[in-house]
Image (tube, rainbow, N blue to C red):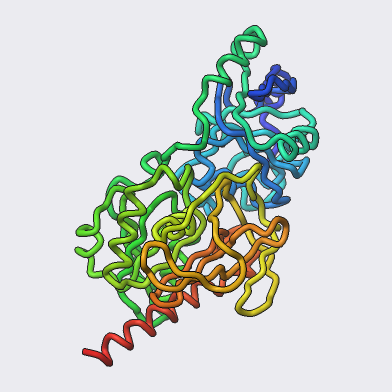
Amino acid sequence: MTVPADTRAVRAAKDPAVLVLEDGTRHVGRAYGARGTTLGEVVFATGMTGYQETLTDPSYAGQIVLQTAPHIGNTGMNVQDPESRRIWVSGYIVRDPSRVVSNWRADESLDDALVSDGVIGISGIDTRAVTRHIRAAGSMRGGIFSGDAADLPADEQLTIVQGAPEMSGRNLSAEVSVSSAQVTEAADDVARIGNLAVLDLGVKQATIDNLAARGFEVHVLPQDVDIDGIRAIDPVAVFYSNGPGDPAASGDHVELLRGVLDDGLPFFGICFGNQLLGRALGLGTYKLPFGHRGINQPVLDKSTGRVEITSHNHGFAVEAPLEGDFDSPNGYGRVEVSHVGLNDQVVEGLRALDIPAFSVQYHPEAAAGPHDANYLFDRFADLVRDHLGKKDANA
């Protein structure tokens, strides 16, 4: 199906807009999506497909996302593929937005979806130049100004950008988490394992679907749940999701996880959950210069020697020795780095050797692909079954 371009969108695309970075760099282009002013950390995502999944990933809250792929929007937006209840990016930067939607599954254009969710964007700028600048200088605060805001003096726009909060030190979990528990039943065609407590720090629908498909009854819990709230559902295991923000600003989630580990419950964390496991074990975290975002990141699984192409979205990482095992500073036994990023040798996974806990820094659910790391959900299910079997044997 080919949907004609929205005449409003085509006409409005001539409106001026400007991207302003905190170091004073300016890029003048055309307004895209909603009009006004938006602020956030400017980051780039390298995926050539899957922009709908990127936009609806809660991990991008607080960030202005730049797509390095030059042509965006040709497949429109549909009601089947969102990863959450809305678009979460603070702003959106593309070079050449499609003027038509050419996909039989499309329900609306990308531009219309951005307008509906109030997401301010900019198009028609040299996204390659911005990407190269961020790679050299690091991710930084930025602002998109369109509509009346595009006419503000340049020095006033820069002052607004430099007054925006930095990502370091921000806890954004409350902005993206559910307000009450939500339950997804285990799939009918698999053996039921038991109740799984999922701490929603920005969980994606594909993650919930993958866990339910392995036999878990998935209880998605608000980010402010306490250890008694987790115990109340009688879980067989606990899962920490992806999410936005600085792990160093999530002390309550770290203490909650220590309670989970002290209870002896199996644990699996992805992305933000990996960073929080690192902190619970007693490790530090740090901010990457420009992060990893996209669906083409090579990672080595040290246990198999396989290189996987993986989906990433993180600006922080765990500090840990890449070779050998080491003792957890917080007393949880031996730990090893299980996965390593091959582009820059960043820690991409942790495995506790004396307790049933592991995590990865990337996204094994990868709704837009690739699916190289999907086996990790099976690894988690096997870990929980093995743990339950040992409990029964010792009962």
Asked if 294 appears above or below 148 in the picture, the reply is below
Where residue 359 sits in the image (x, y, percent)? Answer: 49, 65
Where residue 281 sits in the image (x, y, percent)? Answer: 41, 62
Quadrant location of the C terminus in the rendered image: bottom left
Q: What residue appears at the point 56 percent right and 52 percent down from the top-left corner?
A: 317
Q: Is residue 210 visible?
A: yes
Q: What residue appears at the point 62 percent right and 52 percent down from the top-left corner?
A: 105
The residue closer to the viewer here, 212 or 2, is 212
Tell whether 190 sits left or right of 306: left
Tell whether 395 sits left or right of 371: left
The residue closer to the viewer here, 371 or 223, is 223
Where residue 205 sits in the image (x, y, percent)? Answer: 46, 57
Asked if 125 appears above or below 259 in the picture, the reply is above
The residue closer to the viewer here, 276 or 386, is 276
Q: Is residue 99 visible?
A: no
Asked if 269 appears above or below 144 in the picture, the reply is below
Q: What residue appears at the point 30 percent right and 64 percent down from the top-left corner?
A: 260
Q: What residue appears at the point 58 percent right and 21 percent down from the top-left corner?
A: 161
